[in-house]
Image (cartoon, helix red, strand yellow):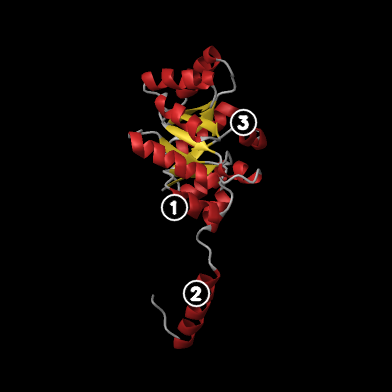
Amino acid sequence: MKFFADTAVIEDIKDLNDYGLLDGVTTNPTLIAKSGRDFKEVIAEICSVVDGPVSAEVAAMDFPGMIAEGEHLAEIADNVVIKLPLTLEGLKACRHFNQNNIKTNVTLCFSANQALLAAKAGATYISPFVGRLDDLNLDGLDLIQDIRTIYDNFGFETQILAASVRTANHVKDVAIAGADVATVPAAVIKGLANHVLTDKGLEQFAKDWAETGQSIL
């Protein structure tokens, strides 16, 4: 499974990229607003750091506006992916971009039927929101599994990009459920490396090595 960082903080993106843990980045208006920076400058800088896909979301809600904004965003860098809302206008825009070889990420997906429509429109990625469904006492993992089954049944190439992934357990569960990608906050990605038994083991190894009085160099 690929990891996308769900952030607009360039320092976190550079850090993860240096570890070799980053396959792409997703942004949204909320993340850009938190950065306090110019939207297009942020996208351009992220694209200069990351070789993989970088999702940049349109603000327009109508088809002509989405096309105009999406085409403008696509000019920033070759790895920009146009992020579109899962509405009829968004699906129409998705089809347009697909026909023009521009990658898309259809976001705010909360049902398998929505995901089916996005795949038929030619979406590169579909973003089902796991955590937000969990907040409503609905099972976000069931949605990932249903989409996986539908896509496999009919050979759709749209990749399942699990979004609103908040915890290490979420990461494990969406991987088991068959997501192609998880977009995750930087702190959660780093936290996947942590385990108390790993820490205890290293502490013991260090103690035992010190007692030998040896040096490798």
The local secondary structure at tag 1 comes to: helix
Residue at 59% across / 22% down in the picture? 59
Q: Nearer the viewer, mark 2 or mark 1?
A: 1
Residue 197 is situated, as x and y percent measured from the top left of the image, at 52, 73
Image: 68 above or below 87:
above
Q: Which residue in the protein does label 1 denote?
A: 176
- Which mark is on residue 202? 2
- Which mark is on residue 29? 3
* Mark nearer the N terminus (3 vs 1): 3
- Tell me how far mark 3 sits from mark 1, CA to CA: 30 Å
Q: Nearer the viewer, residue 203 or 117?
A: 117
- The quarter holding residue 78 reads top left
Report the quarter where the C terminus lies: bottom left
In the rendered structure, are the residues bearing label 2 and label 1 in contact, judged by CB atoms less than 8 Å apart?
Answer: no
Q: Is residue 193 visible?
A: yes
Q: Nearer the viewer, mark 3 or mark 2?
A: 3
- The quarter holding residue 149 reads top left
The local secondary structure at tag 2 comes to: helix
Image: 18 above or below 157:
below
Residue at 64% across / 37% down in the picture? 35
Q: Nearer the viewer, residue 116 or 191?
A: 116
Q: Nearer the viewer, residue 210 or 111?
A: 111
Residue furthest left in the image: 155
Q: What amino acid type should be assigned to the residue bearing mark 2? A: Leu
Residue at 51% across / 52% down in the picture? 171
Q: What amino acid type should be assigned to the residue bearing mark 1? A: Ile
- Which mark is on residue 7? none
Residue 190 is situated, as x and y percent measured from the top left of the image, at 53, 55
